[in-house]
Image: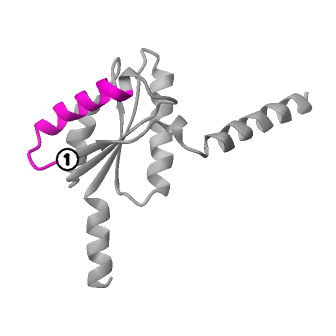
Amino acid sequence: MTEQSQDQDQATHAIGVIIVDHGSVRAESNESLERIVARFAATCQYGIVEPAHMELAKPDIAEAFDRCVEKGAGHIIVIPFFLGPGKHWEQDIPALSAAAAAKHPGASFRVADPIGMHPLIGDVLAARLEECLEKDDAR
């Protein structure tokens, strides 16, 4: 590994990613996020990726933030697994993230836009439509 690629690798791993959903009392819903996070972690360039639930389940944002820092992250990107903006994205998640960051001097964070705001959401919707139609054709 060259010195430059090693520096780039260290910089990449200095970023932690938290994917946060609302959280549920239903275990199946919370396990769904864990599967999504595992898939994302397997394909993304960042080595520190953690799931979190905003409320109702563990790990919460503070626990996920702690895990990221323990693994060497100095900057955390919190990605809301929400379709649209709202109170949780605008207020709750930033406040919970700020409280978590306050326990780690020198660590910083940013909250990404909700996934529904991404231009590729149309592709996902089209894929779901086609899957549904294929199931209808199979009957």
Instruction: Please tell me whether residue 104 belongs to the stretch shown in magenta.
Output: yes
Residue farthest to the bottom, as pictured: 2
Mark 1 lies on residue: 108
Predominant SS of the magenta segment: helix
Q: Which x, y percent locates residue 31? A: 47, 30
Q: Residue 104 location in percent, x, y?
A: 11, 43
Q: Which residues are magenta?
A: 89-108
Q: Residues within 10 Å of mark 1 (few under 14, many from 20)?
A: some
Task: Choose top left, top right, bottom left or bottom right for residue 66.
Answer: top left
**Position of residue 114 measured from the top left corner of the image (x, y, whole percent):** 46, 35
40 vs 11: above or below: above
Residue 59, visible in the rendered structure: no
Does 109 sit left or right of 124 as displayed? left
User: In the displayed structure, would residue 67 be above or below residue 96?
Assistant: below
The residue shown at (35%, 17%) is 56
Element marked by disc 1: strand
Number of numbered callouts drawn: 1
